[in-house]
Amino acid sequence: MIIQPKTRGFICITSHPEGCAKNVQNQIDYIKSKSPIDGAKNVLVIGASTGFGLASRITSAFGENASTIGVFFEKPPAEGRTASSGWYNTAAFEEQAHKAGLYAKSINGDAFSNEIKEQTAQLIKKDLGKIDLVIYSLASPVRTHPETGVRYKSTLKPIGNTYTNKTVDFHTGEVKEISIEACTEEDIVNTVTVMGGEDWQMWIDKLKKEGLLADNFKTVAYSYIGPKLTEPVYRKGTIGKAKDHLEATAFTITDALKDIKGKAFVSVNKALVTQSSSAIPVIPLYISLLYKVMKEKNLQEGCIEQIYRLFKERLYLGEIPVDSEGRIRIDDLEMRDDIQEKVAQLWEEATTESLPEIGDLEGYKDEFFNLFGFNFDGIDYEKDTNEMVSIPGLQ
């Protein structure tokens, strides 16, 4: 079929297998160009098919020579209908991993469920024995609780008062004012249940109970803090409550892993164009301004650069550097005073007319479409493309 991008709101409902393969290959090439990492040998990535999770799997495999198992929930292709981008990403990753002689298998299903946890545990037991590192990178907006069967849906709302500020429709470039109504207590509970640390802890508890965690085991979950500019809708909103819970859970997990000298960390990463961040009001405008400033200072990083630096410069040091709250900070460049002061100044100047000059909206749009395999040089998007791509190591 001829595969073109089709958008619905803040998501793209088509994806291009060759473009996704190009995206994966670019990240593999980056890791291969860097010095090797002396780290984990057996890695489980929960939420392994896009964004930081995909970058973590690529870094583990091609930076550490690790065996990897990826868990995700992606839509397979059907005749005349593309798969989701994460499906094609994983197919491309596994093809390259297997060519390099690396173990790579995947499980597609609801990571929140007991069934997928059990299937994963059995695969680890059969093939790898023990796991050295678990990356937790789920970004689902809904969760069906495995014990109660209740379905929870997260929200992106401020707490206390309606929040009004600028945002941008990155498809049209229009900068406009947006108001988001304050949340209810139920919204907070739902968001913490979906995006907090409970499921992360359930995964680690399950793997430990099955005897699948190696001595000196590590687990890392990903979080974001961001600037004062986005605080009301992010860090001090419903999602911030979930991130607070996630970060508190790291200490709970670490306490439960003392007998194997295991540790749990939260890594605070920088703002990037992801399927999740595109849907958060205010964030696309902030990112377009941030990218402009960071590129001018030659400090810009994507997912793969961020995760390589996390693994190489933080995670496998004798003493892992953390902030006063015990978090690893890979958002250190984004949060530099000079960066944030410049972004805050540009924010005041941002209008529909000025944004093309003061921001990097084209870079934002390119990265958004790259997520789905589009806008890559060297790919003919007018040619007939086979959408029926399979994942070699899918269980």
Image (tube, rainbow, N blue to C red):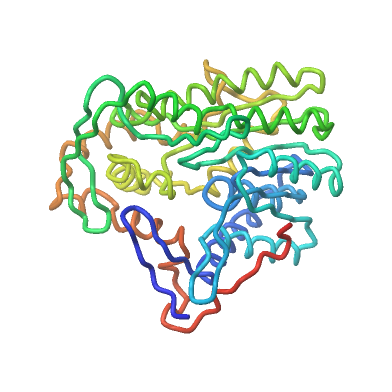
Determine the residue located farthest toward the front in the rendered image: 149
Q: Quadrant of residue 225?
A: top left
In the displayed structure image, the side of residue 128 where residue 21 appears, left or right: left
Q: Residue at x 23, y 22 (%)?
A: 161
Whether 366 is drawn above or below 256: the answer is below
In the displayed structure image, the side of residue 173 where residue 144 appears, left or right: right
Residue 85 percent location from the top left of the image: 51, 60
Q: Residue at x 52, y 29 (%)?
A: 329
Whether 7 is drawn above or below 388: the answer is above
Name the one closer to the observer, 141 or 18: 141
Q: Quadrant of the C terminus?
A: bottom right
Whether 48 is drawn above or below 5: the answer is above
Q: Residue at x 62, y 35 (%)?
A: 313
In the displayed structure image, the side of residue 28 where residue 269 appears, left or right: left
Q: Residue at x 52, y 49 (%)?
A: 51
Residue 333 percent location from the top left of the image: 44, 35
Total number of numbered discs in the rendering: 0
Name the one closer to the observer, 217 or 83: 83
Name the one closer to the observer, 83 or 136: 83
Whether 318 is drawn above or below 114: the answer is above
Residue 4 percent location from the top left of the image: 39, 73
In the displayed structure image, the side of residue 99 where residue 272 appears, left or right: left
Q: Quadrant of residue 263?
A: top right
Residue 332 percent location from the top left of the image: 46, 31
